Image (spheres, helix red, strand yellow):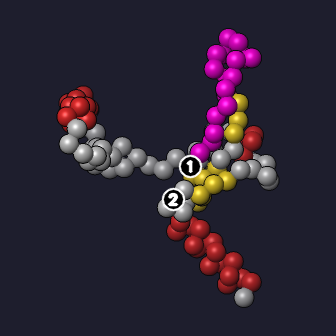
Amino acid sequence: MALEHIGDNQKLKLLIKKLEEKYPHYDFSTPAPLDRICKAKHECNKPDKLMYYDVKGNLYCGQKFQQTIDETNINRWEWRTCNALVKTVEELKLSRAKQNKFFN
């Protein structure tokens, strides 16, 4: 988790200080790893699954699935979105280059 400098907000600085005191051995300067784990394997394997691109050009899974809220009552559920990273920009460029090389 990277704690980015957002502004001169005193409450944010206090939160950062408390987090660094609570977790002294954690390196907050490194960003969090990309989430590549699919949350709905039964839905994401379908051929017509939803995909979307972010601002940087990364390809994400946008498949919606039902997740139960209460384990004692299976009828209580809510909609969730997978949001797993499928391919980064570099991986997309490599796959497009391979396709162009194959078809040309």
- Circle 2 packing at 10 Å, graded few (<14), some (14-19), many (20+), is few
Which badge, 1 or 2, comes first in the chain's sequence?
A: 1
Q: Quadrant of the N terminus?
A: top left
- Between 8 and 35, the one lying in front of the other is 8
Quadrant for residue 53, please give it. Answer: bottom right
Helix or strand or loop: what does disc 2 sit on? loop
Residue type at mark 1: give it: Arg
* Residue 65 point in image, percent of width and height: 70, 35
* Residue 30 point in image, percent of width and height: 32, 50
- Circle 1 packing at 10 Å, graded few (<14), some (14-19), many (20+), is some
The part of the chain drawn in magenta is 67-83
x 25%, y 35%: residue: 12
* Left or right: 23 as drawn, with respect to 66: left
x 57%, y 52%: residue: 85
Q: Does 73 lie within the magenta span?
A: yes
Residue that badge 2 annotates: 55
Residue that badge 1 annotates: 36
Answer whether residue 88 is visible to the viewer in this image: no
Camera-side mark, 1 or 2:
2
